[in-house]
Image (cartoon, grey):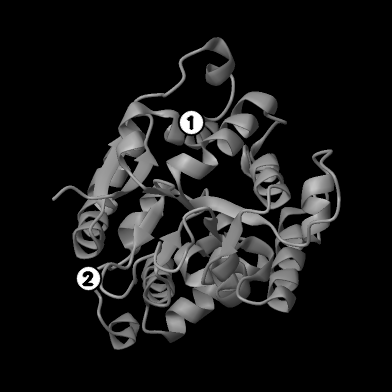
Amino acid sequence: MRCTKAIVTLAIGTEYVRAWEKCCKTHWQQYANRHAYDLVCIDRPLDTTARAQQRSPAWQKCLVLSQVFSHQYERIVWIDSDVLINAQSAPDISAGVPADKVGAVSMYEQPTPALYMQVLSRMYEYWGRAAMRNYTADEYHTLWGLPSGYNQVVQSGVLVLSPKHHRECLEKVYYGYEEKGGREWHMEMRPLSYELQHAGVIHWLDGRFNTMWPEILFLHYPFLLSQKSKRSRGGRALRELCSRLGGLSDVDLKRAAMTNAFLNSYFFHLGGGELADMQLVNQGCTSFLECSL
């Protein structure tokens, strides 16, 4: 009996394909088998026009429901290729999501609205004056030039979709909006967040289905940020911490922190971080005790 659901991702370029195959594929397949999904990794652009080549491939998730293969499925679960799945504990993400709704995690509410504001404050302090500042979900949309009135943000790295109900909305985003600039604009995410909420089709998911490592890093493990500047005050603090822990390296600390965050997640999203960091996570870990130093 064929599956009626599929997990789909897009990995364009040798670096991304290799990272997904090495760090993601095995555990994604375990999850897919457990919950009766087909697994599809698209390794070629869905749009090869000059317009498509001038912007991030991330936009092309909006074309997934337009593909011939998608028509055989009732549900498509889109997952960015830099997401690790905790196959041992994650339940079926599509369970409980009505067929006409899009399942998604609210970015500005993870882990709580108040703590997310603390995360943003730390990020902006770390990045300096050049950082784009949007302290509210409404600002997140209006800075793009989108209408106000939406107090949540759709984190588009993980989406539960229906080809029957949502193709038109995703195509509207793909063909109706253009790239604004650098990664600070989050590629397709701002217009997609707006259009999905404007259409009234969002079903909010448990935040563990899209746990963002950058937010966890700034909130719980800020000492690891000092790896970028070993001469900074943070760099000195990190060296002292490693020394007190018996000469462990900063990589040892990061491995323990990331593995612990992974265990607390269903889907653990690197969110634009270094692809090499995915290799630090011990995905075979079954207990938080295995994260101890």
| Residue that appears at 24% across and 48% down | 38
Of marks 1 and 2, which one's residue comes earlier in the chain?
1
Which corner quadrant of the image does residue 170 belong to? top right
Rendered view: 30 above or below 174: below
Residue at the spot of label 1: 63
Residue 133, visible in the rendered structure: no
Q: Is residue 218 left or right of residue 70?
A: right
Rendered view: 11 above or below 83: above
Tag 2: amino acid: Gly
Where is residue 239? Give x, y as percent: 51, 73
Q: Secondary structure at mark 2?
A: loop
Comparing 271 with 238, the one in front is 271
Residue 66, visible in the rendered structure: yes
Residue at the spot of label 2: 284
Comparing 10 with 122, the one in front is 10
Rendered view: 79 above or below 249: above
Whether pointer 1 and pointer 2 mark residues with C-beta atoms closer than 8 Å, the reply is no
